[in-house]
Image (cartoon, coloured by chain):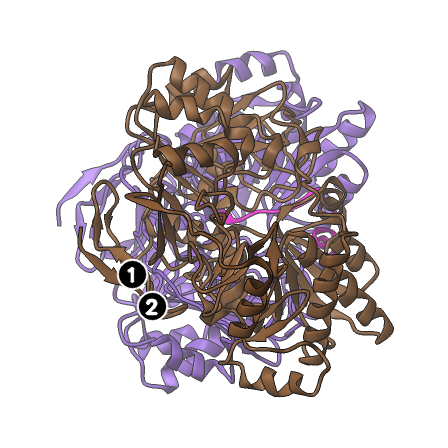
Chain colours: A brown, B purple
Amino acid sequence: MEFIENAVGRKIPKYIEGVGVLKPYRGPFATKPEGRKYAPSKAYNTPGDNKILNNIREAIEKTGLKDGMTISFHHHLREGDYILNAVVDQIAKMGIKNITICASSLNKVHEPLIEHIKNGVITGLQTSGLRGKLAKEISTKNILGSPVIFRTHGGRTRAIEAGDVKIDVAFLGASACDKMGNMNGVDGKSAFGAIGYAMVDAEYADKVVAITDNLVEYPLYPISISQTLVDYVVIMDEIGNPSLISSGATRVTKNPLELKIAENAARAIIDSGYIKNGFSFQAGSGGSALAVVKFVKEYMEENNIVGSFASGGISSYMVNMLESGLFKALFDTQTFDCEAGSSLRRNHNHIEMSASTYANPHNKGCVAHQLDIMILSATEIDVNFNVNVMTGSTGIIMGAQGGHPDTAAGAKFTVVVAPLMRKRIPIVVDEVTTVVTPGETVDIVVTERGIAINPRRTDIIEKLSKSNLPIMTIEKLKNLAESFTGIPEKPEFDEEIVGIVEYRDGTIMDVIRKVKQK
Amino acid sequence: MEFIENAVGRKIPKYIEGVGVLKPYRGPFATKPEGRKYAPSKAYNTPGDNKILNNIREAIEKTGLKDGMTISFHHHLREGDYILNAVVDQIAKMGIKNITICASSLNKVHEPLIEHIKNGVITGLQTSGLRGKLAKEISTKNILGSPVIFRTHGGRTRAIEAGDVKIDVAFLGASACDKMGNMNGVDGKSAFGAIGYAMVDAEYADKVVAITDNLVEYPLYPISISQTLVDYVVIMDEIGNPSLISSGATRVTKNPLELKIAENAARAIIDSGYIKNGFSFQAGSGGSALAVVKFVKEYMEENNIVGSFASGGISSYMVNMLESGLFKALFDTQTFDCEAGSSLRRNHNHIEMSASTYANPHNKGCVAHQLDIMILSATEIDVNFNVNVMTGSTGIIMGAQGGHPDTAAGAKFTVVVAPLMRKRIPIVVDEVTTVVTPGETVDIVVTERGIAINPRRTDIIEKLSKSNLPIMTIEKLKNLAESFTGIPEKPEFDEEIVGIVEYRDGTIMDVIRKVKQK
């Protein structure tokens, strides 16, 4: 295998059998697209068309789904999703093999895929992330036999639009759907809010199957995905359990350590001058990230500051800020709890957006590139400010790229919040296990005991030099962490590549290797 | 020139220099699309992009608009549109020549195009229709020198999606727009309502310029066309005069003749059993067509009937029916008056739709194909039920295809209303001057003195046989007309082809020849 070093110093294979030629990452905006997008297939419709089918089996038959094809799913129902397992079980029953899944993300609930992978039903995975047993089986046993392709939320829509992945059949869950396939995620017992990830699948997949547990009278409104894109409609008893959508991302932490980190981060943001009228803001998931919002909110209220928009996965906490007039609008690609879903239904200024609108670098303007402030968490940060959110200190896959690299590249001020250590494992390290977000796009790292500013940001260094925040170099922060934890043993890896970390522009940021079994 | 006869008996050239190979019309759903759509060009965006330009000239320069290119416009501002003339004037000033205009329609206000055509600035026209002096100059003098391509509303989006026409630069008026190019037509002093025709241009044009007289704070909401599709934003003092949008399409006629036709039509529809709970409905423009709605409304109220949806160009009359609970929803691709525009802004169940969603036969399901009843007007109808709405009895172009052929093909029951004669010219004739809507898609022709049912609809013939409506054969209706008018002299034509009437599926329904000068 021949390798080439990319712009973050990772050795990337030039070619992987079954995947193709890999282009190394060259910088956040260095690789520009050429040519034209992938062209969706033409379609045809006549009066009296009946799209309603009896069950998933019939949908598989009618769409012509067969060995070797690629199918897609969205993960808006998160740990409550029933659709992916139901479809793949049926595919397995019908004896279809060698299927690639292109999902916006995979969660613990998708553990049954392990058996389908072992049986040769599923032979390819493309996703934002992997968690739980499935991730462990892939990381430690390479059960898939080919690398999982990990994409960012923006990168996935870019890849689909560019034809890097061609979806044969998309199975898209809708909490409300009419007989012609108009869909939304805001009505019905399984309402999950925005359906932003599914929009690109609907546009580009050769065949699109809407799956719902709530068939409504024609026409449905509001329409998030149009009948013009849908081939078939299947009714299930339940598409999922919406009570499992929220994963605590909504609650502000009470953990004093996380609150300390958040307070430090908020002070750094405020002192850097970014909180002012018309500013825009996003906070990722994770205890400290959301807690930052609490301090930002207090500062806005005290100083009568009104922001422009907040974006992202939207929780009821952000809805509360919208309804209090602290932000003019919310952009929502994925809704984190029921209350936020109801706001999307109710508030004109709570705007549903596609994943392309959210974060695709290869359209004419994405929302992530309009952000002033982005708060992100991390599992590891290295002395070059590179961030890992994909693998744990054991080397095992346990997370997702999500919008992390997208928003870091887009925002004017990207703040990474993390504890200095977790269970005696240092978080600031010499070299991250896996590079997900390049250090060039990270402006500041905030921990409970120290804050490191990217040397590129001389303006911020100057601004914060007068503050009494514990500013130090990233090397000193690393040494501080190691002074508590010692230098931990690093995981050992085999040569086999089990994952490819694709940057949002389609170049390769890193590869993930099989963890050596001891 | 070699010809081939199409399914309505018109002789279609096999090939026209500069246009290409023509496929003859074979039947409303006989020609199926093959292969994949046209692929829009890839794009690229970075944080800090500034889309705002100083003026139209700068937009022309930045988009790289040059000799031989195709530019596009929408006609939502109808006779009040200022954008097309401003852009073409600037193009002319800059010495650019040989430009093709692909507009959703052209109106009398676009008369200045005559000079631009004579000067070689504009050498190609593609539109739904032509009116006034421009139409006359083309019909009688062939000033363009190449045939105008006339498309239906559904056919235009089909053609753009299929790559039959490739738009280099789209100039899209928005009554509200933000700095990133998010657009709508419902806010601002020049609000025109739905922006349905422009949506396909935004998706497929290589470069998209938003032109607005109302730049709003980011982000605009509601968003009808997304920032992800827009390259540049230009601010004009006024994009148009919205008081000229309404062309009387809103008022119910007081003309007793038109009321008589409408009453006959309403009785035929009611007796045919189409007005029942859950039915859907559209009425085209024209005095009698809208008057039918008045009678239908009264019947619905008397019998407590609630319809599913009404669609089309939407006027305040339809909004009133929506708000009275007579219809569950409105689908709106083009708004006919300010009051309806305000309803689109206000009512969740007043649904904006793209022209593709409205009427494109080559997507996975258009609204026109969901219609139960369609009321259409006509300038001529022949004994084969073919309808002309493009040319007058003089042979001169004076109208537009609009959604006429789309909805006629889509609706379960297509009613054409027309007076038996206009100014001693018979409307029901042996052979229409120009076939626009094929007789196969027309179910019934209603005049003030007689009603003819298409012999294909034996079910309707049976149902109406018991009524006391003046049912007769179409031949008898024609004879009745001629008994009043005599047989009028037909216009004479030269060989030169000045217009091509393209059916919604891209096949050719008819050609329009230059009117012979006497």
Provide the residue designation for mark 2: A7
| Closest to the observer, A218 or B375 | A218
Residue drawn at (30%, 52%), measured in percent from left and top?
B164
The question of residue B229 being in magenta is answered with no
- Residue B512 x/y as whole percent: 32, 52
Q: Give the SS element for disc 2.
A: loop
Provide the residue designation for mark 1: A24
Tell me the magenta residue range: B340-355
Q: Is residue A178 above or below residue B79?
A: above
| Closest to the observer, A314 or A397 | A397
Residue drawn at (45%, 41%), measured in percent from left and top?
A201
Q: Give the SS element for disc 1.
A: loop
Q: Is residue A328 above or below residue B114?
A: above
Mark 2 Cα within 10 Å, few/some/many (few <14, many 20+)? Answer: some
B203 left or right, relative to B308: left
- Residue B323 falls in which quadrant of the image? top right
| Chain of the residue under label 1 | A
- Residue B191 x/y as whole percent: 67, 64
Mark 1 Cα within 10 Å, few/some/many (few <14, many 20+)? Answer: many
The mark found on residue B489 in the picture is none
- Residue B12 falls in which quadrant of the image? top left
Residue drawn at (66%, 18%), measured in percent from left and top?
B468
Residue furthest right in the image: A302
Q: Are marks 1 and 2 in contact (CB under 8 Å)?
A: yes
- Residue A379 x/y as whole percent: 54, 54
